[in-house]
Image (cartoon, rainbow, N blue to C red):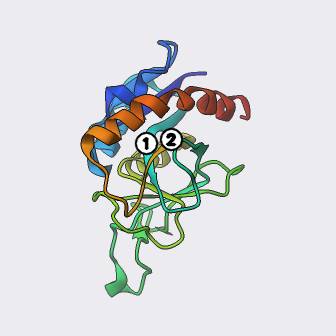
Amino acid sequence: MKVLLVASDKAELKPFPDSYIKAVSGIGPVLSAAITASSIQEYKPDIVISVGSAGSAGRLKLGECVSFGRVISPDPDLTAFHLGRGATILPTRATINGFVLDRNSEYILSSSSAFATVPFSSSDASDMEAYGVAAAAYLQNIPCFAVKVITDIIGKRISLGDYGFNLRKLRDALLPEVERVISSL
């Protein structure tokens, strides 16, 4: 099985062996969607997994690593068309409010172009790339997952140095969770 891992930074991919296809997207949903789409075309993976870090909205603890059941985004605002905040319209004209990822997980990841300073609605954690990765995979009809390690708590100030320290300390939890997700397929 060909597995494409997409992370915002190469440091998040460090725990993974070369048997995985790896893509570094940069930060944010636009870059992650573009890099994921390009990588899908080049490598033709069987599944895509957004890996990296996330901030907890309170339910998940620092150091926990989970596969998220769904990814949503607060960025789309089509409320003028009587759609809820976060809903968008796909090229097929279907209206969606996020993407289903891991049916064995109840956790919801909010993914935005802005660093979360307050939790978004009913999400358990926030990142900045998973929604873009999921959108690119969805449009190519490829299963997608988001496996994130909790490196910070939304609303608590964290320096870039402390975030980097937490990521280096906690990123090794990503590989076993990714392998668990793959083995459950």
Q: At 26% across and 47% down in the image, what residue appears?
A: 159
10 Å crowding of disc 1: few (<14), some (14-19), many (20+):
many
User: In which image quadrant can residue 25 be found?
Assistant: top left
Relative image position of residue 21 (x, y in whole percent): 45, 21
Give the mark, 2 or 1, whose residue is nearer the N terminus: 1
Q: At 56% across and 26% down in the image, what residue appears?
A: 175
Q: Which mark is residue 149?
A: 2
144 left or right, relative to 22: right
Establish if 66 lies above or below 113: above
84 left or right, relative to 2: left
Quadrant showing the C terminus? top right
10 Å crowding of disc 2: few (<14), some (14-19), many (20+):
many
User: Disc 2 to disc 1, how far (Cα)?
Assistant: 5 Å
Relative image position of residue 17 (x, y in whole percent): 50, 14
Q: Dot 2 lies on which element?
A: strand
The amino acid type, in three-letter code, at marker 1 is Ser
Q: Nearer the viewer, residue 63 or 131?
A: 63
Assess whether mark 1 and mark 2 are in contact (beta carbons under 8 angstroms): yes
Q: Is residue 54 visible?
A: yes
Establish if 65 lies above or below 110: above
Relative image position of residue 80 (x, y in whole percent): 32, 86
User: In which image quadrant can residue 122 be found?
Assistant: bottom right
Quadrant showing the N terminus? top right
Q: Which mark is residue 53?
A: 1
Establish if 104 lies above or below 14: below
Q: At 56% across and 51% down in the image, what residue appears?
A: 61
The amino acid type, in three-letter code, at marker 2 is Val
Q: Which mark is residue 160?
A: none
Q: Is residue 46 visible?
A: no
Q: Nearer the viewer, residue 145 or 127?
A: 127
Q: Dot 1 lies on which element?
A: strand
Q: At 35% across and 51% down in the image, what residue appears?
A: 128
